[in-house]
Amino acid sequence: MLLAIDIGNTNIVIGVFDGGLKGHWRVSTDAGKTSDEYGLTLLGLLAASGMDKKAVHGAIAASVVPRLTPTITAAIFEYLGLTCRVVTHQNCLMPVLTDNPEEVGADRLVNAVAAFHEHRRSLIAVDFGTAVTFDYVTERGEYAGGIIAPGISISSEALFSRTARLPMVEAGRPSVLIGKNTVDSMRSGIFYGFLGLVDGILERMMKETGASPVIVSTGGLAPLVVGESKYITGTDEFLTLKGLKIIYEGKM
């Protein structure tokens, strides 16, 4: 079995592959936890799912939280006896055509690899996380660059923290466009403002590249915009985990 871990700013997504995806879990990111705490969490998740830790033969991680990377890799070594491979621009199986390849988030590269592996054509991978990222892959399978914008939850938090009278509103799909009260007005503004950002950026990317790329989406908040966006018509919840498996196996 292969252990795949996506270390994000808000959540850590863990998957176990045995051929296909056998199990997956999502835990809160906590940079204050020790390697022992994360190691015991891993053992508990495996045990609760009836998986033998001795059957895990390999581990790979993508991290955008540098402080946590050595903590997680130490936990995997100490509790599973495995050296965890960490994804970088140098081992992601895809040419990275940016000014500073080392700056590109590992999760973005992994998503690009997984999406190209499936579609084999030019594409834009959109990841709806703490930030929303748009990454363009050429028809030759090259990572050509992308865009980073605030995620929908960040917009909601900013309205609350930077105003005196507006309440904290959970990001979600509104029931009406024109709100009759403060909460509905905020929810509508946050959602449709974010939707306009997503579709507007995708339109501009397609215009600039002169291509007709496949749009691939993932991330915990992706289902919010499916059916509302002109371009986001579906989502792949496990895109990043799939990409980690592809990179570990070294087969594009």
Image (spheres, rainbow, N blue to C red):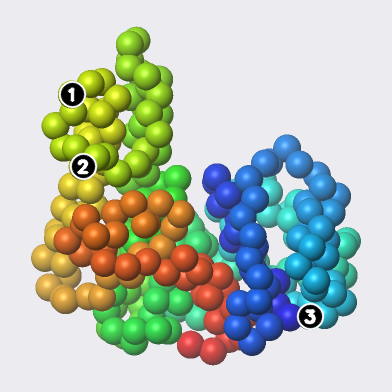
Q: Which amino acid does label 3 sit on?
A: His
Mark 3, Cα crowd under 10 Å, few <14 / some 14-19 / many 20+, is few
Residue 228 percent location from the top left of the image: 21, 55
Q: Give the mark toward the camera: 1 or 3.
A: 1
Q: Which residue appears at 55% of the width and 46% of the height?
A: 9
Vertical side of 118 occupied by 3: above or below: above
Vertical side of 193 occupied by 182: above or below: above
* Disc nearer the start of the sequence (2/1): 1
Report which residue position mark 2 lands on. 192
The numbered mark at residue 57 is 3
Does residue 148 appear to the left or right of 15 in the view shown?
left
Mark 2 vs 3: CB contact within 8 A: no
Mark 2, Cα crowd under 10 Å, few <14 / some 14-19 / many 20+, is some
Q: Which amino acid does label 2 sit on?
A: Tyr
Q: Which amino acid does label 1 sit on?
A: Lys
The numbered mark at residue 38 is none
* Disc nearer the start of the sequence (1/3): 3
Q: Quadrant of the N terminus?
A: bottom right
Q: Is mark 1 on a helix, strand or loop?
A: loop
Q: Which residue appears at 80% of the width and 71% of the height?
A: 50
* Disc nearer the start of the sequence (2/3): 3
Vertical side of 56 occupied by 76: above or below: above
Mark 1, Cα crowd under 10 Å, few <14 / some 14-19 / many 20+, is few
Report which residue position mark 1 lands on. 180
Residue 252 percent location from the top left of the image: 48, 87
